[in-house]
Image (spheres, rainbow, N blue to C red):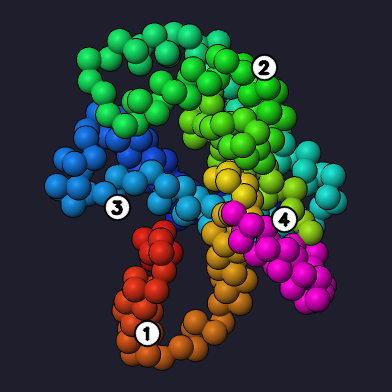
Amino acid sequence: MTKPKLASLESLRGLLALWVVVAHVTARVISEGTIAGFHARAPLEPLLPVYVFMTLSGFVIFHLLERQRESYGAFILRRFFRLAPLYLVVLLVAAWMVPFELRTLDNLFWRNPHIYDAIKIHHETLDHFWPYLWSHVLLLHGLIPETVLPDANFTFLSQGWSISLEWQFYLLAPLVFWLIAGRRYLGLGLLAAAMAGLLFLGYPSIGFLPNQFAWFALGIASFYAYRSSGWFARLNPRTHDLLLPVIGVLLFFLLRSTWPVL
C-alpha cells in the first residue's frame, strides 16, 4: 500500500509554478531597468524556482525509489508515461504555431531583450525545423550544445529544456539510488567525479544534467536527512534556533545562487 503524497511539497510545487509563470510574463512586458529599479530582480528571476523544482525532484524521486523498489525498466516506463504524453501534445501544438507566434512577436508594439531573443529563436526554429523537432520528440534537446543547434534548449517550448533535464535525471537516478543503498561508495565517488568533470568542461547547454546535478543532489541529500529525522528531534531547540540564521547567513554569502537553497 503506497503512502499518501507529501501535501506540503504539492503545495510548494503549485507556488513555484506560479512564480515561473509570473516571472516569464513580467520579463516580456516590463523592462529590466524597471525590474532593477524596484529591486525585484531575484523575485522575478524564473530560474530560481526551477532550481527548487530540481531539488524537489531529487527528493521525490528518491522517496519513490525507496518506497516502491521496482525494476529499472518498470521505473523508467512509469516515469516516461508520467512525463511524455502531455509534453508531446503541447510540443506538437507549439510546433504547429511557430509561424503564428513569429508573426505575433514581429508585430508587437513594444520590444525588450527577451522579445528580440524570442524572435531570433523562432527564426532559427523555422530554418532548422525538423532537426529541432526530432531532438524534442526524443527528449534529447537538453543534450545538444549551442555549436550543433543554436538555442536547441529553447525552441518550440522555451521552458522545455527542463523536461529533457528531468528525463536525463530519471535515467540516472536508479543507478545513484543503487549505489547509495548498497553503500558502494567507490562507484558513487567515481560518478560524482565524472559529473564534476563534465561540469568543468563547460558544456554549453542549460539542459545538460551535469550542469544542474548539484540541485538534484541537494534534493537527494534532503531525502536521506528526512528519512533519518531522529537526529532533528534530538537537537536542542536553542541550538536549532541559533544554527538556522547562522547557516542562512553563511549560505547567502558563500553560494552563487542563494535563494533556491534557502
Mark 3–mark 2 distance (CA, rounded to whole Å): 36 Å
Residue drawn at x 67%, y 58% as measured from the top left? 198
User: Which quarter of the figure has residue 101?
Assistant: top left
| Amino acid type indicated by mark 4 | Ala
Numbered circle sitting on residue 206: none
**Residue extent of the magenta highlight:** 176-202
Q: How dense is the environment of label 4, judged by Cα within 10 Å: few (below 14), some, or many (20 and up)?
A: many
Q: Is residue 260 above or below residue 234?
A: above
Q: Earlier in the sequence, mark 3 or mark 2?
A: 3
Q: Secondary structure at mark 4?
A: helix
Alpha carbon of mark 1 to alpha carbon of mark 2: how far?
Answer: 54 Å
Give the crowd class for mark 2: few <14, some 14-19, many >=20 residues within 10 Å: few
Which kind of residue does numbered mark 3 sit on? Ala
Left or right placement of residue 66 versus residue 42 in this view: right
Q: Nearer the viewer, residue 148 or 217?
A: 148
Would you identify the image quadrant in which residue 29 lies? top left
Q: Earlier in the sequence, mark 2 or mark 4?
A: 2
In front of the other: label 3 or label 4?
Answer: 3
User: Looking at the image, is mark 3 or mark 1 nearer the viewer?
Assistant: 3
Identity of the amino acid at label 2? Trp
Q: Evaluate if marks 2 and 4 touch, with contact meaning CB atoms under 8 Å apart.
A: no
Quote the CA–CA distance across marks 3 and 1.
25 Å
Question: Which mark sits nearer the N-terminus, 3 or 1?
Answer: 3
Res 173 label: 4
Q: Is residue 165 left or right of residue 172?
A: left
Residue 97 shows in the view? yes
